[in-house]
Amino acid sequence: MRKILIGLGSVAAVALMASTAQAQQTIKIGLVMSFTGQFGDLGTMMDAGVRLYMQKHGDTVAGKKIEIIRKDSGAAGSAPDVAKRLTQELIVRDKVDIIAGFSLTPDALASADVLNESKKVGVIMNAATAIITATSPYFVRTSIPLPQAMAALGTWAAKTGGLKNSYTMVTDYGPGIDSEQAFQGAFKEAGGNIVGSVRFPVVSPDFSAFVQRLKDSKSESVYIFVPGGEQPAALGKALTEHGLSPKVTKVLASGELTNEAPLKSMGAAAEGIITAWHYDSGHKSAMNAEFVKGIAGLLNGRKPDQFTVSGYDGMHAIYEALKKTNGDTDGDKLIAAMKGLSWESPRGPMSIDPETRDVVQTVYLRRVEKLADGSFGNNEFDKLENVKDPVKAKLKAEGKLNPDGTSKK
Amino acid sequence: MTDTATPLYNPQDLMRAQVRWRMLETVFWVSALLPFFVAETYLVLCTQIAIAALFALSLDLLVGYSGIVSLGHAVYFGIGAYTAGLLAKYGWGEPLSGLLLAGLVAMLFGYLISFIMVRITHFALIMVTIGLCLLFEEFGNQAHDITGGHDGLQGVRMWRLFGTFRWDLYGFTAYAYSLVVVFLCFLVIRRIINSPFGLSLRGMRENARRMPAIGAPSKQRLQIVYTISATFAGIAGGLLAQTTQFVALDALSFQRSAEVLVMLVLGGAGRLYGGIIGSIIFLVARDQLASNNPQYWYFWLGLLLILVIIFLPNGILGGIAHLLSRRKKS
């Protein structure tokens, strides 16, 4: 028994030494994403962005090789304790230098403690609740804090859109509640009136009952937020079935509702839906055209969406920061290097706010219209530049934000 | 491992023989210490296995030993988790007393709910337990201000264990703490199963109507075992909340209830070590398959489960026991 123990121990020791020796030439990035389950597609799209970036820019930065380790946080539905354990294991077992991904808000929130303790940078490529970046000084976000776009939509709807009343329908979790409050707040401030609101359960909701309630309210417009994945298409279908086309009731939504798949399933019924969002595959720029082409090559002709572009930009932030630190992966140095980074993304110009470590970007107002090829797409008709997250701006004004962008306890 | 008793005609001897520690058991529990030395980077996974094992053990008291089917056992797991989590969030982060309270609160709920459970059987039981689970999950979601809803309970801060041991990143403290708690619970459960009370439970599993005739009131005993089982499930939930310092709504979910049943069936229900072996195999397989193939690993897990059920209908331990008894006969 003792011999076996000594034997096993020495094997483990050798393995450990081998892995630390290797760590000197490679930089490991751990991706914690939902590759399976209800939000499985989200991980696939995010990962495609990561892959495309590495395909274009190579897998060496500052003389060091980049290695990606992928972990599925979609196991067991959406269990944040799994995401937290995977983050923890990536750091202690795989010795990764940077964590990236985070499909859903609870996953990111549960992992904040691990980042704080290990002092590793966590790049959020999707999770969209405003407050996440305030829970750890090591979080950086390249996706979107939802209120950023939703407050803009609320103001636009009442001021320019000429709407007097609205009904809100959101998914009952952090990002949904966040966007509900942002939209309602901005809409009311600009003179609008909220006539009612409902919240959907997060997992497998039956939309038709909720859509019926909306119909009964006879509101002239509705604001919708559902998480990406399978739900937007299902909700779109429910709206169509109840005859609530945008011609009858103005539909205002976050960009998830008018991504490629839901647009396809809604068909002509989607015409006229108005969304505020940071990215659309139809955005007109040379860089985006090349990006769309690259993703089509990777994913059998599929178009990129906001998950893909966030994965792509997340990798850009990592690469640029590593260049600045000359390959040093110390968490504090990396986060300092990421603060204030600004670049041209397929979505347009964007930067990392040095105060909050959150993304600053252009918010586009889009309307679903028939395109030249007969399909439906988002037409950008207005935009707001350099939008910051309104939630953290408010926290800061109230003196509730520390200098490192975390919230005061 | 204890069910295959050789015919001993003196009841005292029979009971004594069941309580006696076997060599294999000692080896098993000593080897549970191995991860500290040979797999220190796997301690977080080991902690979750230990917790799942305790949860499966608690379910085994019902499914394996008393013949009560439950597809909603996560209710007690979740109650324990939220109790421990909320205590720590609102200023009482002492682990041991928190865990005790988690068990007590789950016990209280278990006792109240047991009044319904002992009145129904079979399919009705499956439906009611699922319904109960969905009810509690929805309540947890609606009570957003208390539980954090789908975002999970945040701000759970545990004090150091015994005021000295920090909850480290590698999970040394977490695994040591969980292992000791799980082992102590195991000892209690083992004692219960091998007591005359435990024997009467098995009697009810085989024939619930006959037991009152020989002087064992079934309903009352089923209520007792239901309450005991809920208590241990609550302790398991409390352990998860304390070691991850986070509680997700998932702790109350139907998925967790179903998963623990799968682990139990995989290992072998009605065998003391069935739930433990099942949770080890299930979680290790899930971890390995998912890290080797993050996108399509569910396929392999499904295949594994189907194969085990086809070839080892009584679970892995049941299959081994069957093989051993065949060898003895030949």
Image: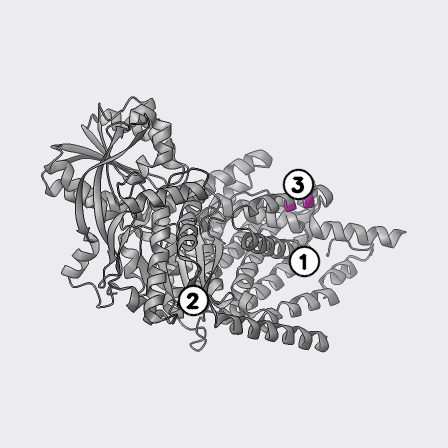
- The CA distance from mark 2 to mark 1 is 53 Å
Q: Residue at x 44, y 70 (%)?
A: B167
Q: Give the class, few, some or many, for how many residues have Cα within 10 Å of label 2's Cα (few <14, many ≥20).
A: many
Q: Residue furthest right?
A: B330
Residue indicated by mark 2: A97
The image shows residue B89, relative to residue A3, as above or below, that is: above
- The three-letter amino acid code for the residue at tag 2 is Asp
Horizontal side of B304 relative to A347 (left or right) equals: right
Same-chain status of marks 2 and 1: no
Q: Tell me, for residue B208, which label it has, or none.
A: 3
- The three-letter amino acid code for the residue at tag 3 is Ala
User: SS of the residue at dot 3?
Assistant: loop
Label 1: chain letter: B
Q: Which residues are magenta?
A: B304-308
Q: Position of residue A193 (x, y in %)?
A: 13, 36
- The CA distance from mark 1 to mark 3 is 18 Å
Q: Residue at x 23, y 28 (%)?
A: A272
